[in-house]
Image (tube, rainbow, N blue to C red):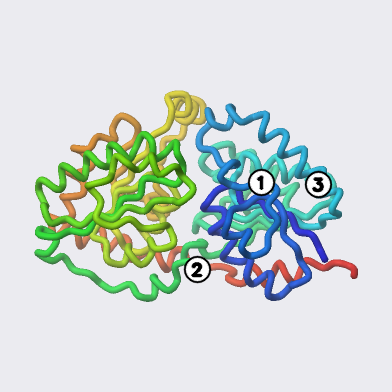
Amino acid sequence: MAKVLLIAGEPSGEEHALGFVPELQKNRPDIELWGVGGDLLRARGMELCYHLKDFSTMGFSEVLGKFAYYKKALDFLTEEAVRRKTQDAILIDFQDFNLRLAQRLSKKGIRVWYYVAPQAWAWRPWRAQTLSKCTYKLFTILPFEEKWFRDRGVSQQISIPHPLTQAWSAQVQKLQVRPWSPRLLREPHLIVLPGSRRSEVLPLLPKFVETIKILKAQFPQMVVTLSRVPHLDPALFEVAHGWVDHWITPEELPEHLLHADAALAASGTVTMGTGLLGVPTVVAYHTSLFNEFIVRKIINYQKAVSLTNLILDKMVFPEFLQQQAQPQLMALALTKWWRSSSDWEKIREDLARLPEMLSSGETRVGQMMAKEMKYES
């Protein structure tokens, strides 16, 4: 059996992996996956050396706090890859850790398939040169990334559809035009997405609940659905009890978004999903003061935080960052869509552009990997 290292260090990475791993396994039953992942990858037979619930972090302060942990993991995975005679490694997103691992593995003669390019266009653009030297294939998922990386010498770049377009393809096909209706003034449906990490849920969910309270006073029949990841402590969500009508899992989210009238979401990949399915979304972001200082002062990042806004190149989703994430402001932004037919039609028109923008590129990634991962028997 051929050993292939796979690193999916956070929930979104595991979701990305499930977009190509089944096809890879179907075409190459002789391949055994090992590395970092979650329960879904383990259910597909992958051997977990680390579980993503212990691996993922958010922001510079969390990374610094786990520096020794990551250093040990880098050493172990590199040594284990050599010991297992691994010839290929699939590294998914998780850029700070995976870029370091990619450099180590390439020096050992291991081919690196880097799935979801680091956002070098946002900060640390010199990483493009590093990627050109240490990756066998670099997969990009945002429309503007292909040219950006090619212009900087990454010739092995391959543009692929955003993973959500495949993972949620059934829902995308069900999308229908939903004109403004007086029902929005009587019984709007709100989806609440507080994040997949403790560091997101802890500061944001209480503010989201206060936002719900403000909205309930104006729309007593409003229906609230909250997506809760199973690996987080249920106690984190106690603040929302009594204010949520339906509790769902991330797996159930796409179907529920088809019937949602708006979303209140922590910044992250999910805001691409709400945009893809045409759901007007208010985006909130909260991080430590240290992380904010690094991003704004040292990195000097001043662009949008929502992927939907970045791709459409306009502020379609209102963004409330740090101290701006106030319940009154977020509630006002949500009700603006429900109360104004022109605002509703405008954002739905903007979001209707996304599916096509995100669906171009190589679609048979698993098949490509299966074909090129050639091992002597």
* Label 2–label 1 contact, CB within 8 A: no
State the residue at coordinates (39%, 51%): 228
Q: Return the residue at label 2.
A: 166
Q: Is residue 307 left or right of 315 when viewed as pictured?
A: right
SS of the residue at dot 1?
strand
Residue type indicated by callout 3:
Glu
SS of the residue at dot 3?
helix
Work out which quarter of the rendered image holds the N terminus and state it. bottom right
Residue at far right of view:
377
State the residue at coordinates (33%, 41%): 284
Is residue 146 in sight in this rendering? no
Q: Is residue 79 left or right of 185 when viewed as pictured?
A: right
Q: Is residue 8 left or right of 89 when viewed as pictured?
A: left
Q: Return the residue at label 1.
A: 50
Q: Position of residue 262 (x, y in %)?
A: 25, 56
Q: Position of residue 125 (x, y in %)?
A: 59, 40
Residue type indicated by callout 2:
Gln
Dot 2 crowding, Cα within 10 Å, few <14, some 14–19, many 20+: some
Q: CA distance from mark 3 to mark 1?
A: 13 Å
Q: Position of residue 72 (x, y in %)?
A: 73, 34
